[in-house]
Image (tube, rainbow, N blue to C red):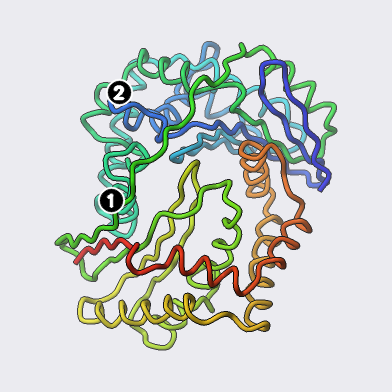
Amino acid sequence: MDYQIYTLKNGIRIIHKQDKSPVAYCGLILNTGSRDEQDEEHGIAHFIEHVIFKGTKKRKAYHVLSRLDDVGGELNAYTTKEETCIYASFLKQDYERAIELIHDITFNSVFPEKELAKEKEVIVDEINSYKDSPAELIFDEFEEMLFKNDPMGRNILGTKAKLKKFDEGMIRSFMDVNYNTDQMVFCSIGNVSFKKVVKWAEKYFGEVGENLREFDRPAVNLYVPESQTIEKDTHQCHVIMGNVAYDFKHDKRLHLHLLNNLLGGPGMNSRLNMSLREKNGIAYNVESTYTPYYGTGVFSIYFGTDEENLIRSFNIIDRELKLLRDKKLGALQLHKAARQLKGQLTISSDNRENLMLSVGKSFLLYDQVDELDVIYDKIDGISADDLCEVANEILDPTKLSYLIYK
């Protein structure tokens, strides 16, 4: 895909792909998230992602928000357990405008006390909305169960009590420790030359002082399988089950991605969707997910069903998991599973914003980006024995945890 890379003297890495579209995309991805917070900082990574939009040394909040909106562009951000990202989409003629703005809000925000107070109320509403949505809340509470008493298990939003205590001093302290220049990637896709992107990156990000990471993320606490049932005032049961899984550097992570896609991925023909919804009509929503992290990962299956169908649903899922553990895929089944995953990856890469973020994260974690052909070869190299081995490791019934809202 003709990616070009460059590293600034302060350690910030640049990756760019020239594209013919009149629409361009760029973003700054930082290798820090809620997992990197101290106990008293719980929720501050996400809070910072909100308040960096609230004014800089040269812009009021309105001018930050209007800078790209005025020319039809969009500015956005997100926080996960291990990363923070500020990104933009815009017309190619506004490239420098977007780069300068991302730099300004990341490194020149002033965090006015009045704006901090307003944004705390916004996040309190966000926390409340999660509590009103059991299908979302259950994922957070499941990871709290998997990673008990560990920063990895804490939800991203934080708590109302911790949120109230955040001030400019705490924000700057967290950023000083965790916004490390050698843990940042500026990623870009658009119809401008790499020479121009490097010029703009040097002009804005090159002035940032070097701040190298001096810590490593600690190992997570020992996992112990657990089952919980929580009484909720909901119309149907919400269930999540799963296990800790391979980390982002594990040799078998792609094997598990393929297995997950076959079992409960986005395809309507996934085994769980076919067995629970299409054949038996006892679940509207069923899915499985695999998320690799640094030093660990999470595999989970989620479904919602009426209480009278709960045991039947578990029996059907247990049967599907046992099939994957005990019966190897035939050559045709394996070929179809591989072809489906390759097709999904290719279609996803056609969304330039998704591609930009995916490329940036890959470069951040691995310092390289595999071309689609290389990924295809890796997928084609996965055997039925490989998938059976992974199924027996991750889907071992003695290692599964369960959380049920009923």
Q: Residue at x 44, y 76 (%)?
A: 272
| Mark 1: secondary structure | helix
The crowding category of the residue bearing disc 1, from other C-alpha atoms within 10 Å (few below 14, some 14 to 19, many at least 20), is many
- The label on residue 383 is none
Who is closer to the viewer here, 36 or 4?
36
- The image quarter containing residue 70 is top right
- Callout 1 amino acid: Met
Q: Residue at x 77, y 52 (%)?
A: 371
Q: Which residue is mark 1?
A: 145
> In the picture, which quadrant includes the C terminus?
bottom left
- Callout 2 amino acid: Ala
Which is more N-terminal, label 2 or label 1?
2
* 302 to 276, vertically: above or below: above
User: In the rendered view, does 108 fall on the left or right side of 111?
Assistant: right
Counting from the top left corner in percent of width and height, residue 102 is at: 60, 26
* 29 to 289, vertically: above or below: above
| Mark 2: secondary structure | helix
* 388 to 217, vertically: above or below: below
Counting from the top left corner in percent of width and height, residue 266 is at: 53, 68
Alpha carbon distance from label 1 to label 2: 31 Å
User: In the rendered view, does 288 fall on the left or right side of 73?
Assistant: left
Counting from the top left corner in percent of width and height, residue 64 is at: 53, 24
- The image quarter containing residue 71 is top right
Q: Verify CB contact (< 8 Å) between mark 1 and mark 2.
A: no
Q: Which residue is mark 2?
A: 117
Give the number of the mark in front: 1 or 2.
1
